[in-house]
Amino acid sequence: MSVDKSRNISVIVVGGSYAGAAVAKKLAGLSQKGYPGLVVTLVDQSTHYFHAVGFPKALVSERFADKCFLPFSAFFDPSSKHQFVHGKLERVVDDHHIEVSGQSEALYFDYLVIATGGKAPGPINVVGPTKEAAIEEISTLRSALETGSTTLVVGGGPVGVEVAGFIASKHKNNKVTLVHGGNRLLPPNFCDSVGNAAQTKLESLGVRVVLNERVEIPGDFAYASHVGQSALQGASGAEYSSDVQILAVGFRVYSEFLAPLEEQLGQKLRVEDSSGFIRVRPTLQIDSDRLPHVFVAGDATSLPMSTKYGFKAEMQGGTVAGNIKRLIDAGADSADNAHGERATPSLSKWVDYVDATLVPIGPRLGVAQMVKIPLGNIFLGNLLVANLKAKDFMIWLRKGYFPYH
């Protein structure tokens, strides 16, 4: 049976960061390549894409912070049928409809991609719905760092290490303390020598590093930081006083919108803990036989924490886009399949085969790991990280997604 590739096909992508942007851009391009009825709708709760990877530098550079925001209005060709919808996903109504804040009617989809990412706490998660509001969040924190004399960073993963490094490099009179619950810095997928080198380089900038310590976080702290004198208690009994507190711990995803659908299906679609991660199959389809047309990519997935990096989320987006194209080519959404068996083409499995991570520690220092090869104490680590990432955090890679200014 031939499949009509000119049929109307609705794809909704929720979340316009690394994974979502990759899916939306790749699928939108198909409408010019033999799929004229394909319409992609990108939904995001902000008017602008935020280059979250660049947050550590945006925190100390007003000019760079401005560059980290790119308008979703420039994402799609304005002459195309594709559209951006500014709003928050409130709930997945059923297997073909979602409700978005600000929309009078539910939005219909043939294929849905959930790329809603992480949520606070976590300092890279600015929460303003517009560029202006988000810039104000960062500016408030930046001003406090400029005038304060002490800063506490909680969490020694890549984000915490980068934030502490850039603050210490920029504000020499601001005494930075980094508290981490592990026995060395950086996650387990990093070699011990890389974590140890990160500590050495932070300490060379004057950062005090405290390991094997957990800090009790007050429930009234603003999204991922708190400006104002505060003394936080450590599990050891030690007290950590500071003018500014930045949290780089407690990763969680927003997935409450799935609750109505879970009730309808009588099936849990999320991991049964407080994380909110959404269960996925190796093909990045949501883990349900009844939802083969729903995909999840990026930080929202139940994949290991070692996959929660921007470039890996973008790679997942490519896998999802390819799998949706395979389903479209097989006619999985066509009227012929509406009341019968769905087409089940062979789909690609996403494989985390890239082990390459760069961690800047200020503009000139850093550590890296390439295919389990540690680049920590050697000069090459500093040179590689400074030139490939710390300079502009690869913002140039993102600008190509927003050409329609």
Image: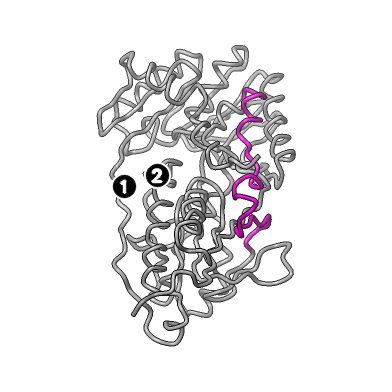
Q: Nearer the viewer, residue 187 or 103?
A: 103
- CA gap, disc 1 and disc 2: 8 Å
Task: Name which quarter of the figure residue 128 lies in.
Answer: top right
Q: Residue at x 36, y 72 (%)?
A: 330
Scheme of colours in the image: one colour
Secondary element type, mark 1: loop
Q: In this figure, which residue is indicated by the disc labeled 1?
A: 352
Relative to 218, say whether 269 is above or below. Answer: below
The percent coordinates of residue 7 (x first, y second) are 50, 72
Dots 1 and 2: beta carbons under 8 Å? yes
Residue 285 shows in this picture? yes
The percent coordinates of residue 358 (x first, y second) are 39, 29
Relative to 29, say whether 215 is above or below. Answer: above
Question: Given the image, on which type of amino acid does mark 2 rest?
Answer: Lys
Task: Name which quarter of the figure residue 220 lies in.
Answer: top right
Residues in magenta, as a range: 60-89
User: Considering only order in the chain, which callout, 2 or 1, is on the residue closer to the N terminus?
Assistant: 2
Residue furthest to the bottom in view is 339
Q: Residue at x 48, y 30 (%)?
A: 394
Q: Residue at x 44, y 33 (%)?
A: 158
The percent coordinates of residue 233 (x first, y second) are 57, 35
Q: Report crowding for label 1: few under 14, some 14 to 19, many 20 or more residues within 10 A (C-alpha).
A: few
Does 260 appear in magenta? no
The percent coordinates of residue 203 (x first, y second) are 45, 16
Q: In this figure, which residue is indicated by the disc labeled 2?
A: 312
Task: State the count of labels.
Answer: 2
